[in-house]
């Protein structure tokens, strides 16, 4: 029992401490330029992290494809479940469908998979992440905004970073060491900044209806685990790949969900409540998930 407890502490403590530092920073009255840091992580840090992880990981191409397929299927299953379940709660799909389909696979999922399974886990998580966000930032935003915008893909540097890294690997071309060193150095900034920014963002959110927040947060976490477990069976995933899919599917609601709700005026206060409650509930669900996958 003691070894698994120590392993959980080693994995989860850095995540919770980094998020807590972000919370503490704001509580002390210090300023934090969230839009600037978000752009830094999105346009520079994450592409560098993606490139380095995919270029250096011992990840077979077939496994990369499997993770991408798992992400596509997870999107589809979350979407269908939300379409069917939200009317039962009397909640509009345009406002709340994203709370069930946008898990926090970036800020929480990537560091958690990295700390639990090392470089291999990070590469698997990134393969899932890239495919997932490509869909969510096009079709997902279309649901919230009421319009389809495929041009969003052009503003996502993780896509070309993924393609370039995979081309190097498929062509078996040696990547210049200066490029690896640069992307590693820049990429190393990304995960701590993601977690710190998550803490800062959570402080700024305001809790909406507790009934709606608790109900949808519970549904997000339970649905996530169920879909992850089903995909592992359907795709025959094993070892780290199976664990990463279950973890990524079971993440709490992403902070981006609130930003989109605010941007398109889709009941942002209630959506913010779902983000806060699901994140708080994940302090209990994540240790249980790790015990299960480890």
Image (cartoon, rainbow, N blue to C red):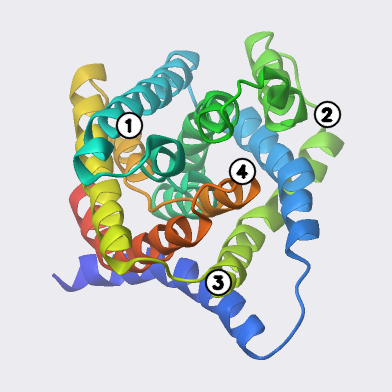
Other-residue count near label 3 (Cα within 10 Å), few / some / many at <14 / 14–19 / ≥20: many
Q: CA distance from mark 3 to mark 4?
A: 30 Å
Task: Give the mark nearest the N terminus, 2 or 1.
Answer: 1
Front: mark 3 or 2: 3
Answer left or right for 24 relative to 212: right
Task: Give the mark nearest the N terminus, 4 or 1.
Answer: 1
Residue topped by disc 2: 176
Q: Residue at x 26, y 64 (%)?
A: 211
Residue topped by disc 4: 264
Q: Residue at x 65, y 82 (%)?
A: 26
Q: Residue at x 55, y 75 (%)?
A: 203
Q: Position of residue 269 (x, y in %)?
A: 49, 62
Residue topped by disc 1: 78
Vertical arrangement, residue 178 with respect to residue 65, above or below: below
Q: CA distance from mark 4 to mark 1?
A: 21 Å
Tag 3's secondary structure? helix
Front: mark 2 or 1: 1
Q: CA distance from mark 2 to mark 1?
A: 40 Å
Q: Position of residue 209 (x, y in %)?
A: 35, 66
Residue 215 picture quarter: bottom left
Residue topped by disc 3: 18
Q: CA distance from mark 3 to mark 2?
A: 32 Å
């Amino acid at each position: 029992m003691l070894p698994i407890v120590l392993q959980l502490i080693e994995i989860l403590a850095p995540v919770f401490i980094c998020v807590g530092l972000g919370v503490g920073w704001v509580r002390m009255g210090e300023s934090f330029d969230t839009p600037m840091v978000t752009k830094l992580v999105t346009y520079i840090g994450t592409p560098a992290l993606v490139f380095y992880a995919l270029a250096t990981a011992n990840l077979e191409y077939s496994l990369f494809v499997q993770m991408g397929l798992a992400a596509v299927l997870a999107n589809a299953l979350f979407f269908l479940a939300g379409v069917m379940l939200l009317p039962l709660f009397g909640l509009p799909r345009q406002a709340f469908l994203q709370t069930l389909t946008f898990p926090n696979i970036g800020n929480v999922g990537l560091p958690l998979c990295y700390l639990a399974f090392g470089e291999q886990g990070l590469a698997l998580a990134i393969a899932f992440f890239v495919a997932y966000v490509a869909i969510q930032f096009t079709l997902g935003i279309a649901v919230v905004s009421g319009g389809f915008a495929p041009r969003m893909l052009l503003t996502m540097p993780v896509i070309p970073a993924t393609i370039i890294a995979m081309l190097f690997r498929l062509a078996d071309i040696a990547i210049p060491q200066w490029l690896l060193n640069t992307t590693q150095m820049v990429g190393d900034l990304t995960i701590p900044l993601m977690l710190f920014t998550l803490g800062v963002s959570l402080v700024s959110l305001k809790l909406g209806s507790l009934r709606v927040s608790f109900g949808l947060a519970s549904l997000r976490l339970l649905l996530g685990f169920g879909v992850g477990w089903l995909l592992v069976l359907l795709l025959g995933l094993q070892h780290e790949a199976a664990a990463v899919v279950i973890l990524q599917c079971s993440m709490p609601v992403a902070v981006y969900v609130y930003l989109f709700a605010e941007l398109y005026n889709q009941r942002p206060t209630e959506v913010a409540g779902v983000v806060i409650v699901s994140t708080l509930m994940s302090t209990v669900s994540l240790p249980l998930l790790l015990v299960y996958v480890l």
